[in-house]
Image (cartoon, rainbow, N blue to C red):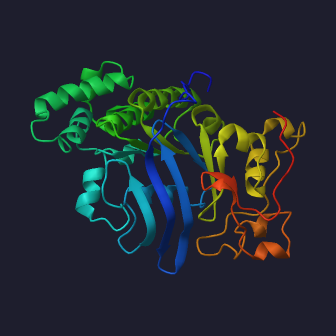
Amino acid sequence: MSSVATQARPAEAPTSRVLDVQHLDVRLGRFHLLHDVSFSIDKGERVGLIGESGSGKSLTSLALLGLLPDDARVSGSIRLAGVDADLVGARERDLAAVRGRDVAMVFQEPMTALNPTMRVGDQVAEAITMHARRGGPDRRAARARAVELLDQVGLPDPRDAARAYPHQLSGGQRQRVVLAIALANDPALLVCDEPTTALDVTVQARVLDLIVRGVTARDSAMLFITHDLSVVATVCERVLVMYGGRVVEAGPVHEVFRRPRHRYTQGLLAASDLDVAVPGGRLPTIRGTVPPAGEFPDGCVFRSRCGHATEVCASDPEWTGPHPGEGYACHHPADEERVP
């Protein structure tokens, strides 16, 4: 991943809040899927969201864009810079105006994110015209801008690529198209939901580089959802660790990865660290599996899989830290520092 652009914001640069999520709760039927999720992202900041499948990462991203099922019960607050209304409880018409303009998303599988019956250039142009204000670019200008965007995301011969249908492009090329659509209106926030999982490692590095360069050039904020901790270490400045629909630890990437406090974070890092593996043996693992939705234990949601759990873990652990964006919630936090 060394080729990925990782320019960080200057420490002294002033920041402004782009996204502010407070006490987000999501219920679907009898299932309580997200519990009191709170975090914020500042302008130009890149934040990683990690955790096993079933932890609530993608559900959080869908809640941010108002893409949850109609029967989902959502409470809390989601505030986005430049948008007057709270996104929780907003009308679909208002949410549609926000998606693609103020917040955009890059999904994991580009083939399902693109319309198979439309040329890719028309799809990029549509993202521009549907949010254009009066006096904005007409369809011809939007098509020309679409070619420019396809060129910016590294598609060879972007004019020919604009005339192609999604099935005529490779997986990496399709993901570049999705990225061009997402960046078309210079959104304040880009949400990436495992955008490189389906790509081979070489293409993955190139797409990651394009994503980081794209948000850096626009000074956009980014929420990057992934299972790959090395990607978070490479492209993100801050990390949120999620399990059981809760944020269990958060902080600067270098701090959390060097000294994880929550036992779940500690387990994730150990399971991905080749240096601790016994030669010829297996990597450490977290025992058990992620419970199905609605079957996480009361109290600490990780206690059924934690080797350090005691009776006190049957009660909810309090958040220890200066604010929701930094700290942890664990009755028996780890104290040891990981060897770099």
Q: Is residue 29 left or right of residue 120?
A: right
Q: Position of residue 71 (x, y in %)?
A: 38, 75
Q: Is residue 131 left or right of residue 329?
A: left
- Image quadrant in which the C terminus is located: top right
Residue occupying image coordinates x 53% and y 38%:
46
> Hey, which quadrant is residue 216 in on the image?
top left
Residue occupying image coordinates x 59% and y 37%:
237
Furthest-bottom residue in this view: 30
- Image quadrant in which the N terminus is located: top right
Observer able to see residue 193: no
Observer able to see residue 49: yes
Q: Position of residue 178 (x, y in %)?
A: 36, 38
Determine whether 172 is above or below 314 in the image: above
Q: Nearer the viewer, residue 40 or 258?
A: 40
Determine whether 37 is above or below 15 in the image: below
Q: Position of residue 181 (x, y in %)?
A: 32, 38
Q: Is residue 308 left or right of residue 68?
A: right
Residue occupying image coordinates x 37% and y 41%:
188
